[in-house]
Image: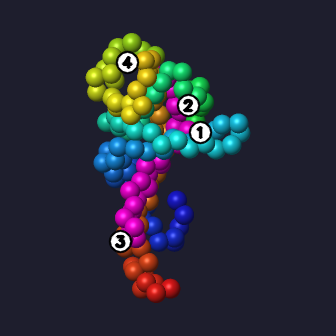
Amino acid sequence: MYRNDGFRELDRQECLRLMATVPVGRIVHTRGALPAVLPVNFCLEPDGTVVLRTSAASELVRAVHGTVVAFEVDEIDVVRQSGWSVVVTGTASVVTDRTEQERLARTGPRSWAPSRQEVFVRVSPDLVTGRELVGGRSLYGLDHA
């Protein structure tokens, strides 16, 4: 994280607890050598693995399978000028194990844009980082800056 920037660093357990409270995040991957960001609904496994459900024919599946990606979630309170952000960085992979596919079909995320053939994509949590801002500018008496 960035030192002395007014944010509090969150530990891994705090990050995972906060992630479990929101239904939508953003997956960050590379497309044509440039960063691409897509909002997606997801679920979080107990070990911190992020699970997405998408069309088997989607460009997303081809772009992320076997690559390192970032997955970001946040919650912002504009009125209070506070909020938090969590980023999971790890390798994305399509779930191919039949037993695991069946389990995720029962317990995993439901696609907000269903298709005939769907797959589950996992992001392994190699690195989990987070930051929280409480009180925003008023914390330092900068309300009128």
Which quarter of the picture shows residue 133? bottom left
Mark on residue 97?
Answer: none
Question: Which of the two labelled residues, at mark 3 and mark 2, occupies the earlier sequence position?
Answer: 2
Residue type of the residue flagged with mark 3 = Arg
Residue 75 lies in the magenta stretch:
yes
Residue type of the residue flagged with mark 2 = Leu
Residue type of the residue flagged with mark 1 = His
Residues tagged 2 and 4 counted as in contact (Cβ below 8 A): no
Residue placed farthest to the left in the image?
A: 106
Mark on residue 60?
Answer: 2
| Dominant secondary-structure state across the stretch colored magenta | strand
Q: Position of residue 72 (x, y in %)?
A: 47, 47
Q: Residues within 10 Å of mark 4 (few under 14, many from 20)?
A: some
**Discs 2/4, front:** 2
What range is drawn magenta here? 69-95
Question: Which of the two labelled residues, at mark 1 and mark 4, occupies the earlier sequence position?
Answer: 1
SS type, badge 2: helix
Indicate left or right for 102 with 31 as reference: left
**Discs 1/2, front:** 2
Residue at 28% from the left image edge and 27% from the top image edge: 107
As rendered, which of 65 and 3 lies closer to the eye? Answer: 65
CA–CA distance between discs 3 and 2? 35 Å
Mark on residue 29?
Answer: 1
According to the image, label 4 marks what residue?
Answer: 101
Residues tagged 3 and 1 counted as in contact (Cβ below 8 A): no
Residues tagged 1 and 2 counted as in contact (Cβ below 8 A): yes
CA–CA distance between discs 1 and 2? 9 Å
SS type, badge 4: helix
